[in-house]
Every structure is written in structure tokens, then in C-alpha cells.
Amino acid sequence: MYYVFILGTAGSGKTTMTKNLQDYLLDQEMDTAIINLDPAVEHLPYTPDFDVRDYVDAYEVMDNYQLGPNSALIASIDLILTRASEIKSDIDQIEANYVLIDTPGQIELFAYRETGRLISKLIRGNNKALGLFLFDSFLAKEARSFVSLLLLSSSIKFRLELPIINVLNKVDLLTDKELEQILGWGESAENLIDELGKVDEYSLELINLLIESLSSNLIPVSSEKGSGFDELYAEIQRVLAGGEDYL
Ligand code: GDP
Ligand code: MG
């Protein structure tokens, strides 16, 4: 069994990707299950095999602990860890080639907090796993935001200790020229620095390092239109076959 964590900023298309990647994998005759980890989602386009909302209700947490929406979501995930053994036995019932994990938009859970790491370990156990980090095209087309997304992706990779495939999502919203430009930034730090204009020495080194350390190119997809999935699936298989080499 392989575990694929679908990660990205709020609204980057994680839920849409989860649904359409499942459909794609089913077409490839791969058994696929889905874990929903978003405690606040109201409507899901797929039927989850495990749903965190069966354990915590973010709206009840908000009321009971007098929290605002963002902190209630973070607290909800903290709370589910108090029920780790029940959750583990539920998840252990899942039989599939691929288990897709749809994650909440509170990306700090996975980038900055130990909870995200604990929960990902609880779910995947000793199985092979990777993360897809979705770059929202709407953000990525601005060079500084592109750099911020690279940093966020690195932070998640460091925190989760998982190989991460960087995916440029919603390419249907980009012109051909914009798409080419973003892919160019991912291929060479020089392209990115040209676009940024004058940057200080520290940023220059950082950008060089970030681009150099990308283990593969950004994979352009539209999770909504279903484009780019052949290339994405090939990359998933490559990373899973390579295992630790891609960390
Ligand atoms: P999540 O918050 O990361 O789970 O994002 P969702 O999957 O809920 O998507 C957020 C919004 O982006 C929804 O309105 C989706 O229809 C839209 N969306 C997701 N993927 C794509 C895409 O590939 N192209 C376009 N144009 N919109 C998308
Ligand atoms: Mg979602």
C-alpha cells in the first residue's frame, strides 16, 4: 500500500485533486481509498473511506473551547490524536493499492507543527508514502509568491520527512506564456532572479539552493480538467520506486 498526502495552501485544489486522482487511478485499475483529514469541510465530491469528521466536529470545538475558526481547526487535529488507537484500527481496515489523504488548508499543521508529522506517521505506519504539494497557479505566477511556495514546500518536506512532488495546479487558468514562465523559474534560478530583479546576497543564495534542491521539475496539471495526470502518475511511480533517494 502506498500513501499519498495531498498538501497545499487553502483553496489550492487539494479536494478536487483527491477526487480526480482517485478516478484516474481507478481507470488504471488501481484500488484507491481516500482519507479525509479536513474537519471543517462541508461538502466532499468523493466518498471517504475514513473521515476525520466522524471523530471531531470543528464547529463543536469552536463552541466548546470558545475558539475562532482557524484555531478551532488546529485544535481539532490536536484532539484527534487523543483518539489515535481507535483511528489507527479504523485506518488499518482500509485495503487499497493507493490511499489518498486529503488534508486541511491549515498548512501550518504540516509545515510548522508537530501534530502534522504525528498524524502522518500514524496514518502511514511503515508503508511507503509521499506528498503532493500543490502550487496554486493564481499565486505562483507572481515571482515572490512562487519563492514563498517553494519555501513552504521545503518546510513540509523537512517536517514530514517525506519525498514531495511539487505540482503546479490550475494551469487551465494560465496563458501559455504564463505557464512557460513559471516552469522556467522551476528549471533555473537564473530565470527566477531575472524576474525578481535586484535581490540581496542572502536571497540570491537561498533561491539558488531552493531551485537546485528540487528533485524534479514542477508537474503542470489541472486537477479540475484532469490534464497532466499521466505525467503526475509517472512521477509518483518514479518516486515510490526510488524511495529514500528522493528525500
Ligand atoms: P482545497 O481547499 O485545497 O481543498 O481546494 P478545493 O479542491 O476545494 O478547490 C478550491 C477551488 O478551486 C474550487 O472552487 C475548485 O473548483 C477550484 N479548483 C480546484 N482545482 C482547479 C483547477 O485545476 N482549475 C480551476 N480553474 N479551478 C480549480
Ligand atoms: Mg479541501
Image (tube, rainbow, N blue to C red):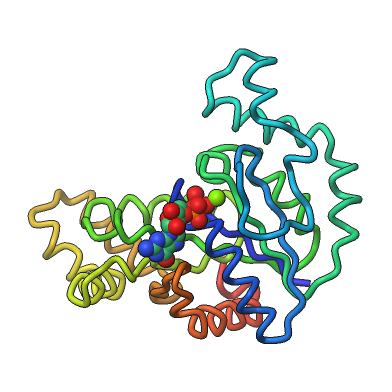
- Residue 141 placement, left or right of 22: left
* 130 is higher (above) or lower (below) than 90: below
**Of 75 and 172, which appears nearest the observer?**
172
Residue at image x 53%, y 61%? 16
Q: Where is residue 242? Give x, y as percent.
A: 62, 80
Residue 12 seen in the current view: no
- Residue 191: image quadrant is bottom left
Residue 125 seen in the current view: yes
* 29 is higher (above) or lower (below) than 142: below
Residue at image x 21%, y 72%? 175
Residue at the far left in the pictured view: 198
Q: Where is residue 232? Give x, y as percent.
A: 51, 78
Quarter the C terminus occupies: bottom right
Residue at image x 61%, y 42%? 42
Quarter the N terminus occupies: bottom right
- Residue 245: image quadrant is bottom right
Q: Where is residue 115? Give x, y as percent.
A: 66, 38
- Residue 17 placement, left or right of 187: right
Please state the total of marks drawn on the protein image. Answer: 0
* 126 is higher (above) or lower (below) than 114: below
Residue at image x 71%, y 61%? 34
**Of 105 and 161, which appears nearest the observer?**
105
Q: Where is residue 212? Give x, y as percent.
A: 35, 69
